[in-house]
Image (cartoon, rainbow, N blue to C red):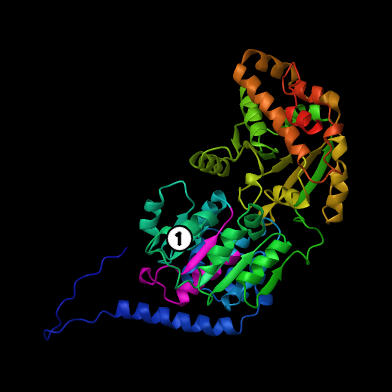
């Protein structure tokens, strides 16, 4: 930062003028007037680059420095409408770039209002998970680096007193629903009376996680005279109910209808059908055949992820393997997320905690080891690759009894090619896993837990056309996990009594 020199006296004892400060302020005022005029007549159909939007130089500099040059479709559609102070109900495919679609209007609105720390909370961004909130925080730090707004991350994991001491004068707060409601109710000097803009990101996911009442309570605590931007990948009844409660005369923005398919065109999608007991051999073979790629593997439960992570690491696959699931502590989850973002070649075994919103750069392959519970889950998983118009591939692993899922996906405009797999050419881990479970008591216990977790996952699915526990061979599945004796399925025994 440039140091200012002290004023020197002029030839008649007066002081030299300081034109720089005045001219800088004057230039900023003129820019604000120009932007206000340009926003009124803005036409998004002419946008090719971010410079075509009526944006402040501070925002443009942040975008340029981090290689954000050309807007995606949802950004073209939403930014101009939001700059004109409209409420937005936005629907977009995963990986469409909606984070910038709301962050840019947030920065511009507060900039036009000349917002300072004295004004307090100007924007509240609510996200379903800590990971997604952290990701939004990282993006706004980059794009908004030339603005003077303070940004706070309120996601729990720390003492509420420590958070309270910092956020009372924070301009932009990024948070999870439960923690924000706690602050609104308990933090004495934290008020939202001056709030200018509310952002609800992944609203469908927020509601899926059971935060409907929490969201209603938060919205009731906020001033009605505000702008609200609500983004949701799916427009369910509960999302529409939330929209009615939180939005005023919103403009509906969607890029779904314009697309021939529900997933990005640059995403190559395929599926295979194999027996349940062949799945681990398929995964091991796939990893061995793709040693110089970044793979994201979705598995249905925390206990399966834990077992496979520990087992595959012991067999030295020639590529780093890590795990991400809800049973991990928050700091460890953040470390794994950052490591996977940083590395070029790595395998990440994950539950659906990684399927929504998390932006992993340059993922080459998404492998859905377990059938998704519905089409929306499939779309969010597959959408972790082929993001921001880059190429990517997704493969879905189905058992013979799950093939009905293919038709459901195709009905929703998802193109899938079938790949035939020869079981004879797979690298089997059966013997290695059997030895591992026989020699290590902990691994045997983890294998048993993984076995039970998968069966419960299938049993409790609502779509019985796809998920049928009766069609699974428990004994062969147990053996594929290294278990010589099939565990008793006690929850089924209780149901049958």
Most extreme residue toward the front, as rendered?
A: 497
Residue 42 sits inside the magenta stretch:
no
Q: Residue at x 12, y 86 (%)?
A: 12
- Report whether 224 appears left or right of 381: left
Question: Considering the image in quadrants, where does the C terminus appear?
Answer: top right
Q: Is residue 2 visible?
A: yes
Say above or below: 120 vs 452.
below
Which residue position is annotated with label 1?
185
Say above or below: 447 vs 349.
above
Question: Considering the image in quadrants, where does the N terminus appear?
Answer: bottom left
What are the residue bounds of the magenta stretch? 101-128
Instruction: Give x and y (percent) for residue 387.
Output: 67, 53
Q: Residue at x 15, y 82 (%)?
A: 10
Instruction: Give x and y (percent) for residue 137.
Output: 50, 56
Q: Residue at x 61, y 47 (%)?
A: 360
Q: Quadrant of residue 18?
A: bottom left
Instruction: Give x and y (percent) for residue 142.
Output: 49, 58
Residue 118 sits inside the magenta stretch:
yes
Secondary structure of the residue carrying numbered label 1: helix
Instruction: Give x and y (percent) for residue 145.
Output: 44, 61
Q: Residues within 10 Å of mark 1 (few under 14, many from 20)?
A: few
């Amino acid at each position: 930062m440039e140091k200012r020199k002290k004023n020197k006296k002029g030839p008649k004892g007066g002081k030299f003028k300081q034109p720089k400060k005045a001219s800088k302020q004057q230039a900023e005022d003129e820019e604000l007037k120009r932007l206000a005029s340009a926003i009124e007549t803005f036409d998004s159909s002419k946008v090719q680059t971010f410079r075509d939007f009526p944006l402040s130089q501070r925002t443009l500099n942040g975008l340029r420095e981090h290689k954000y040059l050309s807007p995606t479709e949802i950004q073209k559609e939403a930014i101009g409408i939001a700059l004109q102070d409209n409420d937005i109900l936005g629907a977009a495919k995963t990986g469409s770039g909606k984070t910038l679609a709301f962050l840019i209007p947030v920065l511009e609105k507060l900039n036009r209002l000349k917002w300072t720390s004295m004004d307090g909370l100007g924007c509240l961004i609510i996200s379903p998970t800590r990971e997604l909130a952290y990701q939004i925080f990282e993006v706004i730090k980059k794009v908004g680096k030339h603005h003077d707004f303070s940004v706070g991350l309120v996601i729990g994991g720390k003492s509420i007193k420590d958070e309270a001491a910092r956020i009372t004068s924070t301009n932009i707060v990024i948070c999870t629903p439960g923690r924000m409601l706690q602050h609104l109710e308990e933090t004495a000097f934290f008020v939202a009376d001056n709030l200018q803009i509310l952002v609800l990101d992944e609203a469908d996911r927020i509601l899926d996680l059971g935060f409907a009442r929490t969201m209603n309570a938060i919205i009731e605590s906020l001033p009605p005279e505000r702008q609200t931007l609500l983004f949701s990948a799916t427009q369910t009844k509960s999302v529409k109910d939330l929209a009615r409660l939180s939005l005023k005369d919103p403009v509906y923005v969607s890029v779904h209808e314009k697309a021939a398919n529900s997933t990005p065109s640059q995403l190559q999608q395929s599926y295979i059908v194999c027996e349940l007991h062949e799945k681990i051999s398929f995964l091991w073979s796939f990893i061995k055949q793709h040693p110089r790629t970044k793979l994201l593997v979705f598995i249905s439960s925390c206990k399966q992820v834990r077992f496979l992570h520990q087992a595959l690491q012991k067999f030295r696959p020639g590529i780093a393997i890590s795990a991400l699931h809800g049973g991990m502590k928050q700091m460890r989850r953040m470390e794994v997320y950052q490591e996977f973002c940083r590395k070029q070649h790595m395998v990440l075994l994950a539950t659906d905690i990684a399927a929504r919103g998390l932006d992993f750069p340059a993922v080459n392959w998404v492998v859905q080891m377990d059938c998704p519970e519905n089409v929306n889950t499939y779309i969010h998983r597959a959408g972790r690759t082929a993001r921001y118009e880059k190429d990517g591939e997704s493969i879905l692993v189905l058992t013979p009894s799950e093939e009905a899922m293919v038709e459901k996906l195709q009905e929703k405009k998802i193109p899938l090619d079938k790949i035939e797999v020869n079981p004879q050419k797979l690298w089997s881990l059966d013997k290695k896993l059997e030895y591992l479970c026989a020699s290590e008591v902990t691994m045997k216990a983890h294998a048993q837990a993984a076995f039970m977790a998968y069966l419960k996952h299938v049993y409790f699915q609502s779509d019985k056309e796809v998920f049928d526990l009766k069609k699974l061979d428990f004994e062969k599945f147990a053996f594929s996990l290294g278990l010589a004796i099939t565990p008793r399925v006690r929850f089924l025994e209780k149901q049958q009594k």
